[in-house]
Image: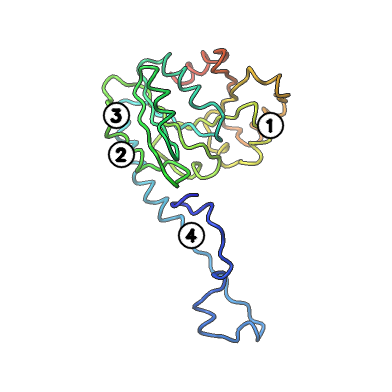
């Protein structure tokens, strides 16, 4: 699925052996000597390059006086619905939206009257800092105070990529189950804020609030937790107050 980090590409058993070792010592397995184990950190160069771009983005954001929030979650958690309400309530805000295909979310957000720039990632299941830098070329930053980056819906790969944001917001909807923080701890561990979303549906789906909150606190003890509903407006005042810092 992801051309950058390699997730989603099935393992090819025919390439499991070490070609160099086998060709140099064809009888190694027969003599009972296992081939040497070699670990190659293929992700590190990509992350190092991403970090340079992220630092450049961060400098640009600070020079413009922007507070920038990276919104991360699984698909369907309510990121776009939350941003629709937020952009209507905060007139000095704009959004950058990441999806594999279509500009549907950006079109929805533009209906609020705010700027919304779409990044279509194709086969890449996360945003990286370089993609964001290109999107910034289209952003009219004068008068803006807040920039929201709606990351691709994915609880794995986006956790590794700094985009230059000030703070990370991870969304957990009541429809996803209480154990998501335990299943995907890395993305929650790096959160500054965890938003429990779609709270208007909690009773209908049998959401165990106390269990979910305990799991969030166990995985992300550093994060503030807020409970919101973009549909009813519940909790949005606290969300706006947190954004204002």
Q: Is residue 120 above or below residue 114?
A: below
Q: Which label number is shown at residue 111? A: none
Which type of secondary structure does the marked residue at label 4 adopt?
loop
Q: Judge whether 243 appears above or below 168 on screen.
A: above
Residue 226 rendering spot, x and y as whole percentages? 58, 22
Whole-angstrom CA distance, mark 1 to mark 2, is: 37 Å
Of the pair 152 and 172, the residue shown nearer to us: 152
Taking the spot 56% from the left edge, 85% from the top edge, the residue there is 26
Q: Nearer the viewer, mark 4 or mark 3?
A: 3
- For label 2, the crowd category at 10 Å Cα-Cα, with few meaning under 14, some 14 to 19 and many 20 or more, is few
Q: CA distance from mark 1 to mark 3?
A: 37 Å
Where residue 77 sits: x, y (%)?
56, 29
The residue indicated by pointer 2 is 134
Task: Report x, y in % for residue 181.
Answer: 63, 36
Q: Earlier in the sequence, mark 1 or mark 3?
A: 3
Residue 212: image quadrant is top right
**In what quadrant of the picture does the C terminus appear?**
top left
Which residue is denoted by mark 4 in the rendering? 41
Q: Tell me, yes or no, whether the two marked residues, 4 and 3, touch with CB atoms within 8 Å.
A: no
Q: Give the residue at x 37% y 33%.
A: 118
Whether residue 146 sits left or right of residue 79 in the image: it is left
Q: CA distance from mark 4 to mark 3?
A: 35 Å
Q: Which residue is mark 1?
A: 178
Answer with the quarter of the image where residue 202 lies.
top right
Label 2: which secondary element: helix
The CA distance from mark 1 to mark 4 is 33 Å
Callout 3 secondary element? loop
Residue at image point 66% right, 35% down: 218
Mark positioned earlier in the residue sequence (1 or 2) = 2
Residue assigned mark 3: 139
Q: Nearer the viewer, mark 4 or mark 2?
A: 2
């Amino acid at each position: 699925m992801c051309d950058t980090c390699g997730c989603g590409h099935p393992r090819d058993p025919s390439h499991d052996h070490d070609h160099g070792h086998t060709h140099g010592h064809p009888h190694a397995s027969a003599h009972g000597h296992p081939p040497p184990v070699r670990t190659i950190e293929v992700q590190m160069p990509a992350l190092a390059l991403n970090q340079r771009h992220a630092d450049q983005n961060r400098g640009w954001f600070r020079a413009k006086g922007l507070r920038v929030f990276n919104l991360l979650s699984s698909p369907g958690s309510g990121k776009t619905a939350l941003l629709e309400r937020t952009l209507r309530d905060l007139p000095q805000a704009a959004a950058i939206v990441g999806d594999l295909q279509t500009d549907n979310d950006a079109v929805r957000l533009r209906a609020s009257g705010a700027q919304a720039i779409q990044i279509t990632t194709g086969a890449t299941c996360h945003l990286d800092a370089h993609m964001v830098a290109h999107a910034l070329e289209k952003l009219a930053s004068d008068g803006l105070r807040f920039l929201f980056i709606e990351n691709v819906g994915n609880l794995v790969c986006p956790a590794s990529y700094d985009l230059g944001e000030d703070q990370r917001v991870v969304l957990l909807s009541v429809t996803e189950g209480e154990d998501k923080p335990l299943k995907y701890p890395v993305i929650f561990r790096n959160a500054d804020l965890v938003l429990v979303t779609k709270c208007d549906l909690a009773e209908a789906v049998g959401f165990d609030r106390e269990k979910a909150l305990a799991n969030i606190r166990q995985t992300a003890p550093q994060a503030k937790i807020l409970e919101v509903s973009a549909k009813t407006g519940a909790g949005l005042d606290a969300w706006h107050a947190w954004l204002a810092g």
